Amino acid sequence: MAKATITFKPKQTTKKLLKGLADRAQEVVINRFGLNDEGEQHTLESIGQKYGITRERVRQIENFALNAIKKSDSFTEAEEIFRELKDVIHGLGGVVAEDELLPMLSKDQVTQNHIGLYLTLGDEFKEAKEDANFKKRWIVDGQTADKVHKALADIHAALSHEDLISENEIIDRVMCHDGICDIATHKVDKEMAARWLNISKSLAKNPLGEWGKSTSPNVKTRGIKDYAYLVMRRHGSPMHFREVAEAIEKTFGKKTHTATTHNELIKDARFVLVGRGVYALKEWGYKGGVVREVIEDILKKEGPMTKDEIVEKVLKERYLKKNTILVNLMNPKNFKKNKDGLYTVA
């Protein structure tokens, strides 16, 4: 993760900002923002229980304390600190997810909490709360933030539930979006686009670093069948279930029994049995069914064909011995030769 540099000392700054508050107001702010050595942020309810007051009363004390800080001389004296933080966020793209911003400023949790206090106090910063589509984020450039939000929403809408794309491709989609191209306040590069991408909750990457909709099983892997899909997709051609089990363990460090893998592949519609223990992905064009049904589908689609043409077509869909196809083709109940010596469905 990249690091953003700040020149001020947060803990010393906070001490000056809080010095004009009454003791209880100071304690409420310290506990709410986690400014003590433990760094634990307390709830309104837990603070209320400590003082024997309601959570609403704690909220009032907190709001009063923050407003008092904003009116203090110490707040005016700290103006340069808020300007510095604004410049940092602007340089990072004008809108940054909190879970990325704070670790960039400091690895220390308590220091991060102090910076969180300044972001809450400063009028330069707009807090956008977490919702179904986006993480909690801090904004200093509203127009850029609006364009970023729209770009991420449009990219999500353009993907199907099954789509997977590389990280380079999804970053390119962010950078090439019409709204992003119109941004005049930032020189957009891949690092900035990736940072904007991190704001999204509806887009995510799977354990192989491929991006898609966060709700897709191809991204949010939940079991052997999802890991099997990913390793087969990366492999690019049919695999025996034993190979799949071995690939899962090697790629993801997930120990799995071959029998379990076989059972998961049988039950999932994404996989097609194309030979003895050999599976392919349905999205590659393989179809289910016994050999007879595969031959029937081919003849219904292509029309009358020679024996060799049929064998060639079937072998593209199934891992079989040629003789297995011929035995099925010779069954007069299912197939017959016409006067031109071509096979048709009986």
Image (cartoon, rainbow, N blue to C red):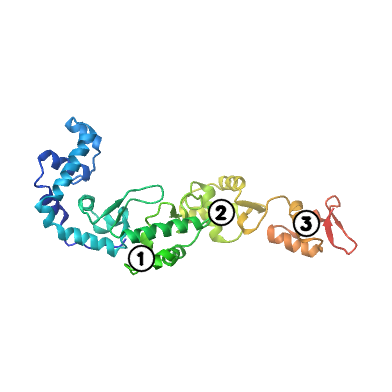
In the image, residue 207 above or below residue 46: below
Image location (x, y in percent) of residue 197: 39, 59
Give, as a three-letter code, the residue at label 1.
Glu
Tell which circle, 1 or 3, labels the residue nearer the N-terminal end: 1
Residue denoted by label 2: 244
Residue denoted by label 3: 300
Residue denoted by label 1: 191
Residue 313 as seen in the image, left or right of residue 191: right
Circles 1 and 3, Cβ within 8 Å, touching? The answer is no
Residue 230 as seen in the image, left or right of residue 62: right
Which residue is nearer to you in this view: 143 or 256? 143
CA gap between label 1 and label 3 equals: 52 Å
Give, as a three-letter code, the residue at label 3.
Lys
To which quarter of the image does residue 203 belong?
bottom left
CA gap between label 2 and label 3 equals: 33 Å
- Which residue is depicted at the point 52% across and 48% down? 224
Classify mark 2: helix, strand or loop.
helix
CA gap between label 2 and label 1 equals: 35 Å
- Which residue is depicted at the point 46% across and 59% down? 155
